[in-house]
Image (cartoon, rainbow, N blue to C red):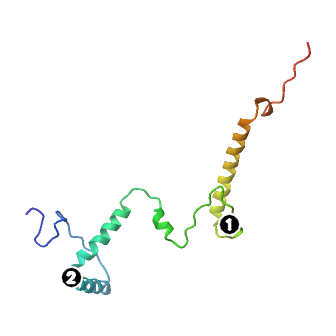
Amino acid sequence: MSGVRPGRPKELKVARAVGIVIENETKEVLESIAQREKKSVSELLRPVIDKYAHDHASSNDQARLDLSIESSEFMAMPTMGEILRPARLDGMSDADLEELAKAAKGRSQEIQAALERRQPFKTRAYPAIRWPDE
């Protein structure tokens, strides 16, 4: 059997042992849990390690939204149509307030430009042209 030892789960065709250093107390707790659940310590830890590897395998260094939302400190940026009450603004950091102000200013400029495009040509940037009487 190439790479498969007797007693190893079939889903692990080729596996490598990895040594880790943990506190003695933690080791004892893991061994106690493993004995109670009739598993090896490796069988207890493998799903945890697999989940960690899966969650962090992406090369994306951005914070994961699902993990951020679970944090009690998470506060989403308000939408442009949201009424901003003082309590909401007081809870935002200076950096978030500056980012919000910059976005609002940019949005205001976009809306102003759209309104100007709707105006007739002569009322925009150029005054009406008067031709001399012939």
Image marks 1 and 2: residues in contact by CB distance under 8 Å: no
Give the number of the disc on residue 3.
Answer: none
Give, as a three-letter code, the residue at label 2.
Answer: Lys
| Residue positioned 29% across, 70% down in the render | 47
Residue tagged by mark 1?
A: 89
* 89 displayed left or right of 23: right
Q: Quadrant of the N terminus?
A: bottom left
Secondary structure at badge 2 equals loop
Give, as a three-letter code, the residue at label 1.
Answer: Leu
Residue tagged by mark 2?
A: 38
Task: List x then y, in percent, for residue 28.
Answer: 27, 87
Whether residue 27 is situated above or below residue 122 in the rendered picture? below
Q: Earlier in the sequence, mark 1 or mark 2?
A: 2
Question: Seen from this angle, which residue lies furthest left?
Answer: 1
Occupied quadrant, residue 17 = bottom left
Secondary structure at badge 1 equals helix
Task: List x then y, in percent, for residue 56.
Answer: 38, 63
Q: Is the residue marked by circle 2 packed among few (<14), some (14-19), or many (20+) residues within 10 Å?
A: few
Q: Nearer the viewer, mark 1 or mark 2?
A: 2
Q: CA distance from mark 1 to mark 2?
A: 53 Å
Whether residue 28 is situated above or below residue 58 in the rendered picture? below
Occupied quadrant, residue 77 = bottom right
| Residue positioned 46% across, 65% down in the render | 66
* 133 displayed left or right of 82: right
Occupied quadrant, residue 14 = bottom left
Q: Quadrant of the C terminus?
A: top right
